Image (tube, grey):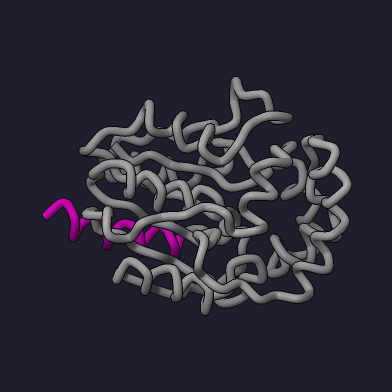
Amino acid sequence: MLVFLHGMWCNSNVWHNFIEYFKARNYTCEAIDIKKGLDLKQATFMDYVNKVDSIVGKDDVLIGHSMGGLIVQKMAEKKKIKGGIAICSAPPKGVGFGNFSLTLHSLKFLPKIIAGKPFMPGSDFVKKFIANCIDETKIDKVIEKMEMESPHVAYELAMAKIRVDEKKIQSPLLFIATKEDRLSPPEVVKKIAEKYNAEFVVKEGCHWIFDDWKEIAEEIAKFLVRIYE
């Protein structure tokens, strides 16, 4: 089964086009709504991981975007899986992520994080860092697909608190970056891939992959052929 894992501020619905694409190629697919049923005021990254862990088995391939890409890494550390694909992945602890502009813009989230209140990214942040390659007339539609995020998880990802022991990973991994990504730039995703000696490719686009998705889906399809051979 192909298991799809969304990123921060999203839910399982973002994967609709990918799921239709792979179902047409006879893959069984499931997109997990990672936050559903959890108290976002209290939820941590490991709460998300444990929810995925309760669903995923050794014959499954995990496909994660952004935060979901980091969950793929953590799951591959926890158990043997068929394979993992991380798209525009958030970095684990130890992978450098020096982006002054992003840090500066993220400071506005600090009061919410300190207060322990779930929050949205805001349209300016979406335009500048998440959907910077998307036509401005479509930004509102991107924001409509978003929802509140756990302040604890936001802090853990922003501060790169999540450790992953690459020595424990025995599953094949593919990392996909996009050229215009300002949240997970290609040079950062490349460093993550190198940590695991994993495959790495760069495609057109930015962090929001769900409008121009087909080239990425085709890259995933090629990887699936290789691991299922």
Give the percent coordinates (x, y) of residue 153: 64, 43
In the rendered image, residue 224 lying in the magenta stretch gets the answer yes
> Which quadrant of the view contains residue 117?
top right
Q: Which quarter shows the N terminus?
A: top left
In the rendered image, residue 165 lying in the magenta stretch gets the answer no
> Which quadrant of the view contains residue 37?
top right
Give the percent coordinates (x, y) of residue 190: 44, 75
Name of the residue lying farthest toward the top: 37
Q: Residue at x 55, y 50 (%)?
A: 67
Instruction: Say which of 138 and 179 sits in front.
Output: 179
Helix, strand or loop: magenta stretch? helix
Q: Residue at x 51, y 58 (%)?
A: 213
Q: Is residue 133 above or below residue 38?
A: below
Give the percent coordinates (x, y) of residue 167: 27, 59
Residue range corresponding to the magenta coloring: 214-229
Name of the residue lying farthest toward the left: 229
Q: Residue at x 77, y 67 (%)?
A: 103
Q: Which quarter shows the C terminus?
A: bottom left
Horizontal placement of 105 versus 215: left or right?
right
Horizontal placement of 162 versus 111: left or right?
left
Instruction: Say which of 77 and 222 sits in front.
Output: 77
Q: Residue at x 68, y 41 (%)?
A: 152
Instruction: Say which of 78 and 137 sits in front.
Output: 78
Instruction: Say which of 76 and 216 sits in front.
Output: 76
